[in-house]
Image (cartoon, rainbow, N blue to C red):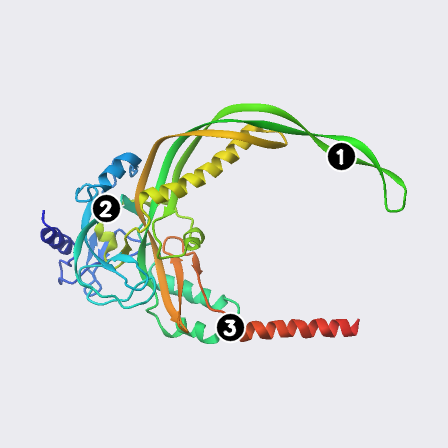
Amino acid sequence: MSFEEKTSEIERGLKCQGCGAVLTYRPGTSYLECSYCGTENEIADNMPEGGEIEATDYKVFGKAMDDVADERYSYVAEVVHCNNCGANSRLNPNITADVCAFCASPLVIDHQQRRIVKPHGLVPFMVDYKQAFGLLTQWAGKVWFAPNDFKRIFNTRNDRLKGVYIPFWSYDSDVYSAYQGSRGEYYYVTRTRRNAEGETEEYEERRTNWYPVSGTIYSRFRDIVISGSTSLPEKFSDKIGPWNLDYLKPFNEQYLSGFIAETFSVDHVAAAGTARAIMDREIVRQVEDDIGGDTQDIDSIDSDFKSIRLKYILLPVWLSAYQYKGKSYQIMVNAFNGNVYGQRPYSFWKIAFLVLLILILFYLLSFMG
């Protein structure tokens, strides 16, 4: 099937059978909705038998990436590049003008189509725009030392949020680790010393007996989730979770209708390195537990990572990118659980006033004393 035929097929699937308008996914439901006539089109449930989306073997996926034209691992989409922040985002075919969801810069939309990597699945939006905007304004109203006009940004504008699917990689692995080290067990001896008054007193001095140990542990890792985006600060991905991947649906372009989908800028190899570091830290903790005793000294760990598997997934957020006095800020609302995290400006004068007030209070207290 050609690019043009595939695009036409997608557009037909998003057209309202009642009035011909473009349908959009209704957060928290399993259907597309027409905002003009109210028609609802149910999204087909394509969950595999067994109710679980299977991960792909890491090596098999790597070979597939060498041939992204393979329709089993790719699909046709219109992707627009932001010249300001570098984000690459998939837009709906009917969009003719927009601003970047990540930096609020105007986008040049040239309607060029290309094949991109097909996600294994996605978590659909559960929090709708109205709920997300309410959470955003609550958050903005509670931040300390924010300029007064910062809060008015969200009180006077209701188009500050864009629904965006952020790319993530999810890794599974079974690991067998052989280790060598020492187990330390504390014991105490009674010693004497002279205190400040010159008197002799007894005290307990802790010492450690060390015993050589070795062993093997088995670690089972599932859904180690790593961000595939560089358009958001790394801490955003950590703060906005957790994600419940039990709600993961097989990839269906209908869930993207009405939303933006960022394409990954951190590939599966780089993300695997981050996932490996997380697994290694957990393996060290498990080895220490296996050694036991009061303290542990690990000499070596030799880990054999078996059957490394991955899923490329999209996770939903409501994203607000805004400019304040020439600087860009981002606020994110987790569109699954409603968690809010973001960047904000600080008022120099409010902070200066607080510092001055504290100094005055210290001065008065010292004067009264």
**As shown in the figure, which amino acid type bears the numbered disc 3?**
Ser
Query: Residue at left 22%, top 64%?
Result: 35
Image quadrant in which you'd find residue 367: bottom right
Query: Residue at left 59%, top 29%?
Result: 292
Image quadrant in which you'd find residue 204: top right
Q: Which residue is mark 3?
A: 347
Residue 90 percent across, percent down from the top left: 24, 56
Compared across the picture, whether 82 is left or right of 330 comes to left
Query: Residue at left 63%, top 74%?
Result: 356
Residue 226 percent across, percent down from the top left: 38, 46
Mark pair 2, 1: CA separation:
62 Å
Mark pair 1, 3: CA separation:
53 Å
Of residues 34 and 183, the one drawn nearer to the viewer in this rendering = 183
Of the image marks 2 and 3, the number of the one nearer the N terminus? 2
Question: Compared to 156, does 300 lie above or below?
Answer: above
Of the image marks 1 and 3, the number of the one nearer the N terminus? 1
Residue 301 percent across, percent down from the top left: 49, 30
Q: Which residue is mark 1?
A: 205
Question: Compared to 279, does 342 lie above or below?
Answer: below
Query: Residue at left 35%, top 59%?
Result: 318
**Dot label at residue 118:** 2
Secondary structure of residue under mark 3: loop
Q: Nearer the viewer, mark 2 or mark 1?
A: 1
**As shown in the figure, which amino acid type bears the numbered disc 2?**
Lys
Of residues 103 and 143, the one drawn nearer to the viewer in this rendering = 103
Residue 26 percent across, percent down from the top left: 27, 57
